[in-house]
Amino acid sequence: MTTTPHPLAAPRPPRRRQRLFTWPLLIGLLVVAALVALSLFVGVYDVWGAADGGEMFLITRIPRTVGLVLAGAAMAMCGLVMQLLTQNRFVEPTTTGTTEWAGLGLLLVMLLVPDAPLMVRMVGAVAMAFIGTMLFFLFLRRVMLTSSIIVPIVGMMLGAVIGAISTFLALSTNMLQSMTIWFTGSFTSVLRGQYEPLWIVLIVVVAVFLAADRFTIAGLGHDVATGVGVDYERIVLIGTVLIALSSGVITVVVGNLPFLGLIVPNIVSLIRGDDLRSNLPWVALGGIALITVCDILARVINMPFEVPVSLILAMIGSVVFITLLLRQRRRG
């Protein structure tokens, strides 16, 4: 005999997850697509009127724009992953010393194997970035810091020490000029035949999307993650590998891109809240838009010369960083 349950006893329908693709996101896609298209046609060289304009368009403009898209999305998403794993909104690869470690790895490869191909240099940069990021995470685990503001300060101090070691080695071996060129964040050297390793960071972007829920749980802390059946140590290791891979590849091909992973995730979080999975497309689009706008400005501010895009990023990032610090202070 079966009985019909009372309507008041019926189970409540599950809550709907926030939609990933919405009309505002589609508008954002269109805006970013317009910026990317504009990037293709901004520059000193006349790709329309010159006899070899079409060839130069394929050699320089398309690789440069693809590099902007890949680097912007990867660095913004890596910043978000670092902020989750450290439970601190002020960290990203350039405020934790990861970029400086990648630069040290690149310099060591250049010293030990001067004629090493690009992929070998990249392996050295990724390996040292991984070591540096793991050391930073171990430091945070061993030392109890009373303020979230101290964490990026400690990271920048460690990065300054590693940067000083790199500078000393470069001065001792007459490599300072080469090191300065390699570490300057600029897309002028992103050409056909040299930018292809940047496609590796697409793996990072896809992996972050796939592991978004696990990174969110890991961001709640070791005890909570273990309690719900997530291997916290493995998630931290995966996140570290992704951060090191992205930072190492971008450092070798492009150079230093400061504060990119700090600006975008924080602005997206302030506007949309902390729903990681629905924020990921916005973080990727925000990273692409920011780096593209900065690169376009770098090309037009002092034509026919170019300003390093890292300079513009540092100016914008420093303002955002100080604003976040003041906002944190007001909150106590």
Image (tube, rainbow, N blue to C red):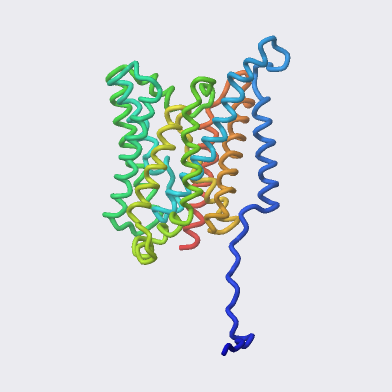
Q: Position of residue 177 (x, y in %)?
A: 39, 19
Residue under the image location 36 percent in, 25 percent down: 121
Furthest-right residue in this view: 49
- The residue nearer to you, when weighing 8 against 151, is 8
In this image, 259 relative to 4: left or right? left
Residue under the image location 62 percent in, 30 percent down: 296
Q: Quadrant of residue 2?
A: bottom right
Of the 4 image quadrants, the one containing the N terminus is: bottom right
- The residue nearer to you, when weighing 320 against 227, is 227
Residue under the image location 51 percent in, 48 percent down: 209
Residue under the image location 54 percent in, 54 percent down: 277
- The residue nearer to you, when weighing 80 against 143, is 80
Q: Quadrant of residue 226?
A: bottom left
Q: Position of residue 21 (x, y in %)?
A: 64, 52
Say above or below: 165 vs 8.
above
- The residue nearer to you, when weighing 4 against 290, is 4
Of the 4 image quadrants, the one containing the C terminus is: bottom left
Q: How many marks?
A: 0
Q: Position of residue 76 (x, y in %)?
A: 51, 43
In this image, 295 relative to 22: left or right? left
Say above or below: 25 vs 187.
below
Q: Position of residue 152 (x, y in %)?
A: 39, 48
Furthest-front residue in this view: 1
Q: Quadrant of residue 231?
A: bottom left
